[in-house]
Image (tube, rainbow, N blue to C red):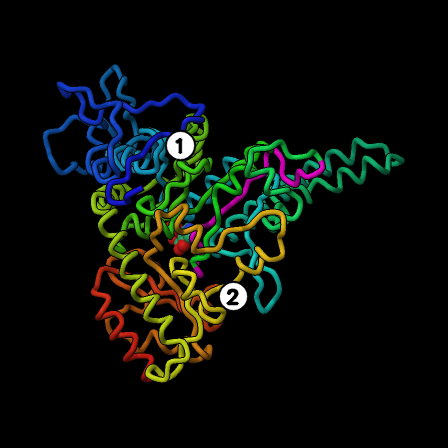
Amino acid sequence: MVLLDIVLKPMMNDEQPNTKTALIPNASHSVQDADFSFSTLAICSDRKVEKVSDVAPPIHLSTTYSMDSDVSDGMIYSRVHNKTRSRVEAVIANLEGSDDFKTVTFSSGQAATSTLLFTLRPKRIFKRMVENTEGDDEAGYAGTKDSMATLRAFANFYCGVVKKELLSKIPATSEENGKKVDDIEDNVMKVIDITKIEEEVDMDQAMQNQDLSPNSKPIYKGDIIWLETPLNPTCDLTDIEYYVKIAHQMGALVIVDSTFASPALQQPLMIGADFALHSTTKFMGGHSDCLGGCVTTKSNGYASSLKSNRSVLGCVMGNLEAYLLLRSLRTLQVRVLHQSQTAEVVAKWLHGQIGNEETNMQVTKVHYPNLAPEQSSQEGLTTTDQETAASTPKYKKLTNYEICQKQMNGKGPGILSFELKTAEGSRKLPQLLEIIEHATSLGGVESCIDYRFQWDRSTAPTLLRLSIGLESPKDLIADLKTALLKL
Ligand SMILES: Cc1ncc(COP(=O)(O)O)c(C=O)c1O
């Protein structure tokens, strides 16, 4: 697939009717069945939301709408409806390969995560783990872990209430029933290491869509697999197709937090995932000026539950933010492709600094998925995937590089991370840079570097996360080189 002209084809097995309508309402020629390219959809797919002659979309700031006796348009109050928001949702839905009304935007990525979990109320969540100095921890964005822990605490509180109620009804002699009641809390929103699935499932069978034997079913209906790929902050990739195959055989759901890729590099719904989630604050917003999040699905049912829960929880995207995001999506593809290209150049340069006296031999590791295998030296790249592959004989797990070719059109994210010799050096480097901003967050037009350990103890204390903006790679490299020499 040529990325600059991606043609999105809806998945054949989508059980929901396709509600795509003509891109240009009342056009004399019918374009509704055509396969539009990504770049066209980013520009045109919101035109049908409202009929205006403005070429640039209008911004609707009103919180309330004047009502005729007939409220057929359904516009009552902006916590529920807003045309600027509907426009941005139509564009995202089309960029993800869903259809017009199945994206739900939120006030932040965190609100998107919490509302989705609140809506699905999963029994168990399978997630990638990481080893750190204090033992095993959940890998990926730390806020997601917090959201799961908070919802679990709520669930446990209500389980406690239910348990008390049930225990009062069970005869004291019924020991077995008492034990079952005791187990209730253990089965609510438990977070489980995703590798437990690989240990029990014959992946060869799963990948060939063969029926899995009943004794190798570690995951059930009501469970979810939560994939964050690329992973914050190491950019490790997970093979979405691999988990979709297992989950769907068991009736479980797959959620992909695709924030680091954006739809310009990865479209999880096209690979079969049930939900694609983003912090739109990052690459989709792209200018570090609007907080937001979104979830896209192919299911009418889930889309309407998410909308209704968003209204109840009140975590809607602001009208101004929706406008800014819409403007940013027009240029998403050009920005992200450029950021991806520059990130690869910078990652290669940093990789070349490993053990290099010219930069004080400061760099010890580079984490970037799209470095060709010959550059994936043991010390240079993360080897987690290769190690897992060696210890899992049933199915050859793909490396980061292979997954990047398979599910990201061979383009790495516009972000990378690298490690220095000492934690002290890593803490100091951001202050020595001139072009690259010392700031958290990512995906903006300005490059930002973040010492993650200060926020997130599950990351290595020597690691720096570098989000690449739209500056010239030559200048970014010069900035890094000068700072490394000052250490
Ligand atoms: C991968 C990922 N998901 C979700 C979020 C949360 O998004 P927000 O900051 O917009 O709430 C972040 C924030 O950094 C993130 O990196």
Seen at 21% across and 27% down, the residue is 23
Element marked by disc 1: helix
Residue 404 showing in the rendered view: yes
Quarter of the figure with the C terminus: bottom left
Question: In the rendered image, which residue does mark 2 sit on?
Answer: 457
From the top left corner, tell me how far across and down residue 17 is, in percent.
39, 21
Above or below residue 3? Residue 11 is above
Element marked by disc 2: loop
Seen at 49% across and 65% down, the residue is 459
From the top left corner, tell me how far across and down residue 205 is, in percent.
60, 38
- What kind of residue is marked 2? Arg
Name the N-terminal-most of marks 2 and 1. Answer: 1
Q: Are marks 2 and 1 in contact (CB under 8 Å)?
A: no
Q: Quadrant of residue 160?
A: top right
Chain part drawn in magenta: 215-234
Q: How many marks?
A: 2
Q: Is mark 2 within 8 Å of ligand 1?
A: no
Q: Is residue 244 left or right of residue 426?
A: right
